[in-house]
Image (cartoon, helix red, strand yellow):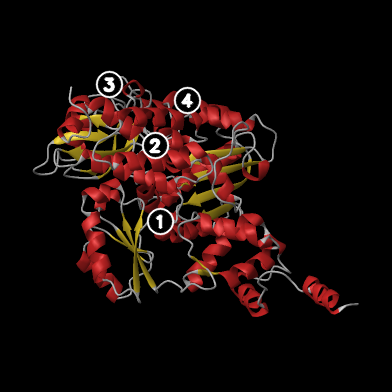
């Protein structure tokens, strides 16, 4: 054999790529558990939880530790890397890169926080931070719009943030979630809690009778889609088992924070409704997908679930709590399913729908937090009680997350069909001092924008479509005569551009292109309209389809305001 042949043979026999460090695999087993004796730790759906464990422990994800995790889970490194880099809350650090500082400040740049001065606050924090100790990032909505602006110091949220209280949190190392006072199991049961669940299980309440109650009440999906709850139960039950139930607690729509309020105040009220829904479809397990921006709620729900297991209301392991990782797209139900399975949260092509083929390929019921929260209350007080609460010919109650230029922002439970003028005057204490109503977003960033002249339209499902808008999750952001509409549009499109999963070209390229067009001194109306049509017609999911709505609303209803800024031609 020649010398050249020996060299080639040695090269072929050598292992390719960066090699596993055995000490890191041992460290991983100490941290997570030994996969050799517990094969469930290798299940792909545990991947994001394992990534969280590494991120929480070390403050970032190094490539050697990701290689160890790939070996631990018997997954290709490409799968580990693709998932880790998809989510905003994972910091993947390559071998030649420097790890991030010990403390990260995330400044919310959603519309509500922008109105409250987040841009200037971000600049102040950047100028005042020691970059060796603190890094300052922009971040999307954190679900605390009523106390804007908001800054996350590690996993601690500073509300009504300014440079002083943020600096104080940094100085004192306040990086853990804030304490939450919540109603425990004993207190909830003392008022009849879990009575409905027990009656369902014991046969005193039948599935048909409960479904009829929800139908008569008019309960619909309150995450935004508005699909009748009882029909969703029927659709899932029509499919052969095994079946799963999933709760979407990933409310990432800018301006939405109602689910957080319900989970903070009455987690067992939510859990009973969720368990009744799981019972209705004979689910094998109940999964709760909680947005990672709610770290304090993770502890609350963990403890509440433990209470249920101790009281033998549920079997250990039946209710499974999972963390999101900073991806708005996972609010879309099929993307949420992908994330629960340990993959990047990219929406699936449909059909099949998740009711037919969802989690682990099985029929899956996906409900919103508020939707299931109402179930025990409707049963206790009657369908007529809920249905009769509507206004202007509508039925039911809605939880409006109101932020922006009002005197009393917050979650306001009000009759479905209430108008914006009524909501602001009766529940929000009127407009903020010195502000006059200019416009409002009835359904968060994707629901469009309506002018003050249309503030007497009933707010509910099916009432806003003719005006090019929709109510969605009832996230109402109020704008005033002091707000810049171009800045509002750019903020909303910037959000969509950042949060696009990138799977389909119309959304990935369209949102970036539209943002570029909006930032120009003069808007090209024809191009904006054409781009909006392509995005609406060809995007895979609602993100790309709805992203142009704010721009189309402005071009339709705010022409004089845009013309006064010379963004469009007068006349």
Give x and y (percent) for residue 151. Answer: 30, 60
Which of marks 3 and 4 precedes in the sequence? 4
Which of marks 3 and 1 precedes in the sequence? 1
Q: Nearer the viewer, mark 2 or mark 1?
A: 2
What is the distance, in whole Å, between disc 3 and disc 2 at their CAs?
A: 29 Å
- Residue 416 in the figure: left or right of residue 421: right
What is the distance, in whole Å, between disc 2 and disc 1 at their CAs?
A: 22 Å
Q: What secondary structure is marked by label 3?
A: loop
Q: Which residue is mark 3?
A: 392
Which of marks 2 and 3 precedes in the sequence? 3
Give x and y (percent) for residue 571. Answer: 18, 22
Q: Nearer the viewer, mark 3 or mark 2?
A: 2
Q: Residue furthest left?
A: 434
Q: Which residue appears at 24% of the width and 55% of the height?
A: 119
Mark 3 neighbour class, 10 Å CA radius: few under 14, some 14 to 19, many 20 or more: few
Q: Which residue appears at 45% of the width and 50% of the height?
A: 268
Q: Pointers 4 and 2 in contact (CB under 8 A)?
A: no
Q: Pointers 3 and 2 in contact (CB under 8 A)?
A: no
Q: Nearer the viewer, mark 4 or mark 2?
A: 2
Q: Which residue is mark 4?
A: 215
What is the distance, in whole Å, between disc 4 and disc 3 at their CAs?
A: 20 Å
Q: What secondary structure is marked by label 4?
A: helix
Q: What secondary structure is marked by label 2?
A: loop
Which of marks 2 and 4 precedes in the sequence? 4
Q: Is residue 475 above or below residue 327?
A: above
């Amino acid at each position: 054999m020649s010398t050249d042949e020996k060299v080639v043979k040695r090269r072929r026999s050598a292992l390719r790529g960066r090699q596993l460090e055995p000490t890191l695999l041992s460290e991983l087993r100490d941290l997570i558990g030994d996969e050799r004796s517990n094969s469930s730790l290798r299940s792909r759906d545990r991947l994001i939880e394992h990534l969280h464990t590494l991120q929480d422990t070390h403050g970032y994800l190094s490539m050697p530790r990701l290689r160890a995790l790939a070996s631990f889970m018997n997954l290709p490194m490409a799968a580990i890397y693709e998932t880790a880099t998809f989510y905003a809350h994972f910091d993947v650090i390559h071998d030649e890169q420097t790890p991030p500082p010990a403390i990260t400040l995330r400044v919310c740049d959603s519309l509500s926080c922008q109105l409250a001065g987040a841009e200037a606050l971000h600049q102040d924090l950047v100028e005042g931070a020691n970059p060796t100790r603190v890094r300052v990032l922009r971040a999307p909505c954190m679900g605390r719009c009523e106390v804007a602006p908001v800054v996350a110091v590690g996993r601690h949220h500073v509300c009504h943030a300014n440079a002083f209280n943020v600096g104080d949190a940094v100085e004192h190392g306040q990086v853990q979630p804030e304490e939450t006072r919540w109603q425990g199991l004993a207190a909830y049961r003392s008022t009849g809690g879990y009575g409905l669940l027990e009656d369902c299980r014991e046969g005193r309440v039948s599935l048909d009778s409960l479904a009829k109650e929800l139908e008569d009440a008019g309960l619909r999906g309150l995450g935004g889609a508005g699909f009748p709850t009882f029909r969703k139960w029927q659709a899932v039950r029509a499919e052969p088992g095994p079946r799963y139930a999933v709760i979407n607690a990933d409310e990432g729509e800018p301006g939405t924070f109602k689910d957080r309020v319900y989970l903070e105040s009455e987690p067992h009220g939510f859990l009973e409704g969720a368990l009744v829904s799981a019972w209705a479809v004979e689910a094998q397990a109940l999964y709760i997908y909680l947005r990672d921006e709610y770290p304090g709620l993770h502890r609350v729900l963990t403890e509440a679930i433990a209470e249920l297991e101790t009281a033998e209301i549920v079997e250990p392991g039946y209710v499974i709590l999972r963390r999101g990782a900073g991806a708005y797209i996972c609010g879309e139900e099929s993307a949420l399913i992908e994330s629960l399975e340990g993959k990047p949260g990219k929406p699936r092509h449909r059909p099949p729908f998740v009711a037919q083929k969802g989690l682990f390929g099985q029929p899956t019921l996906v409900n919103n937090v508020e939707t299931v929260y109402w179930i025990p209350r409707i049963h206790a007080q009657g369908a007529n009680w809920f249905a009769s609460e509507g206004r202007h010919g509508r039925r039911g109650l809605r939880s409006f997350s109101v932020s922006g230029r009002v005197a009393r922002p917050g979650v306001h439970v009000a009759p479905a069909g209430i108008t914006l003028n009524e909501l602001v005057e009766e529940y929000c204490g009127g407009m903020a001092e010195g502000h006059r109503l200019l416009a409002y977003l009835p359904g968060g960033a994707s629901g469009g924008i309506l002018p003050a002249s249309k503030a007497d339209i009933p707010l509910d499902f099916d009432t806003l479509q003719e005006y090019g808008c929709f109510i969605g999750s009832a996230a109402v952001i109020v704008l005033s005569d002091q707000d810049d509409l171009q800045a509002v549009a750019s903020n909303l499109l910037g959000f969509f551009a950042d949060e696009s999963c990138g799977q389909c070209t119309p959304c990935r390229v369209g949102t970036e292109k539209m943002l570029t067009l909006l930032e120009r001194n003069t808007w090209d109306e024809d191009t904006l309209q054409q781009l909006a049509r392509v995005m609406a017609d060809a995007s895979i999911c609602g993100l790309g389809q709805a992203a142009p709505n704010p721009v189309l609303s402005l071009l339709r209803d705010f022409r004089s305001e845009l013309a006064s800024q010379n963004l469009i031609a007068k006349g």
